[in-house]
Amino acid sequence: MTHASQHPATIAVTAGRPPAESDQPLNAQIMLASSFIAGGDLEYARFQNPTWTALEETIGQLEGGRALAFASGMAAVAAVLDQVPVGGRVVVPRHAYQGSLGLLEQHRVAGRIEPVLVDVEDVDAVVAAIPGASLVWMETPTNPALEVADLARIVAAAKQAGVPVAVDNTFATPLLQRPLEDGADVVVHSATKLMSGHSDVIMGAVVTNDDDWFTRLHGNRSLHGAIPGPFEAFLVLRGLRTLDVRLERAQANAKAVVAALEAHPAVSRVRYPGFSTVVSFELESAERADRVVAAVRLARHATSLGGVETTLERRRRWASESKSIPEGLIRLSVGIEHADDVVADLLQALDA
Ligand SMILES: *Cc1c(COP(=O)(O)O)cnc(C)c1O
């Protein structure tokens, strides 16, 4: 049994469990099935799967809504963007996750959606872009610029204009930010990142407390078929059980890293919003940043983020990264190793 009064850190551990009865397992089982005996609620595994249900109950309780698991974060993003009517305008951070911007660009080229790029830290500009839009897409903090949006003000403006708001909550996780409580209509996650936390699974989720949104997104998932495997759902649920302690350690490590980077003469700027586990820092050039990335010994040079291991990359190595992200910007995903070792590794790489 879980209760709304429990702390999120507790819900992450207790939700989505089988009933506390003799011989029940402690954990939801990996349900390998394509079809279920007719006459019940399940019927066919493109519509529902009990392993997803355990995960969805947990994510839903954490965010304060009903969750749907998707095959990837991008599948979740795509399902929400599919709800925009043809020709609709979508307000979107200019530094949103490059995949979300790339998908919006595909919709634009096909004549389906008109994206309106905004600087999320310029609240007045965001608010001014909202009237007449079909959707406000928010991501905060943004990836990799780590800009923070004033969600409460933006949601209030969108409500007044009758425009729904979707928030990509991947970087904050529901333990640090719950956009539905701010009035957002839909929350989107790449569960690939902090939620699963071990760099071993690709998965996504949407969460909403609006029945109409839920029905449309469930219908979209059932018919597009962007469903996760039950094993992947199990892994994400297993990862969620330790999210709070992982976040606690990785955030403490991130703060230690920020202090060390800020004191280093080669680092021209450190970006860290004060929470979450990603730190972006800037060096004078792409070459200098590439040398640092090549010189780390403990951290791994790899894309993605939110795993227990520290990883880093120069974001502009990707041709698809926004051109307003500096060439020398390194995005560091801070893991849960000992802070001293993470800091020492970065300092030796900066001095190499
Ligand atoms: C990674 C990421 C996504 C996409 O998720 P995938 O699981 O890779 O499909 C979406 N939004 C943000 C903020 C991300 O970091």
Image (spheres, rainbow, N blue to C red):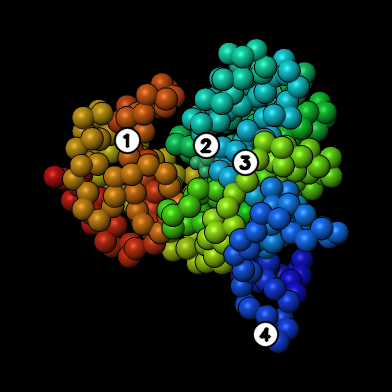
Q: Which label lies toward us, 1 or 3?
A: 3
Residue 305 sits above or below residue 122 on the image: below
Q: Earlier in the sequence, mark 1 or mark 3?
A: 3
The amino acid type of the residue labelled 1 equals Arg
Q: Please name the residue shown 72% across and 42% down the image.
A: 222
The amino acid type of the residue labelled 3 equals Ala
Task: For mark 4, give the secondary structure.
Answer: loop
Q: Gap in Å between the C-alphas at discs 3 and 2?
A: 25 Å
| Residue at numbered disc 3 | 226
Q: Gap in Å between the C-alphas at discs 1 and 3?
A: 30 Å
Asked if the residue at label 3 sits under 8 Å from ligand 1, the reply is no
Q: Which label lies toward us, 3 or 2?
A: 3
Asked whether residue 236 is in view, the answer is no
Q: Position of residue 195 (x, y in %)?
A: 54, 55
Q: Please name the residue shown 67% across and 36% down the image.
A: 224
Asked whether residue 16 is in view, the answer is yes
Q: Position of residue 179 (x, y in %)?
A: 69, 46
Q: Gap in Å between the C-alphas at discs 1 and 4?
A: 51 Å
Contact flag, marks 1 and 3 (Cβ < 8 Å): no
Q: Position of residue 109 (x, y in %)?
A: 58, 13
| Residue at numbered disc 2 | 142
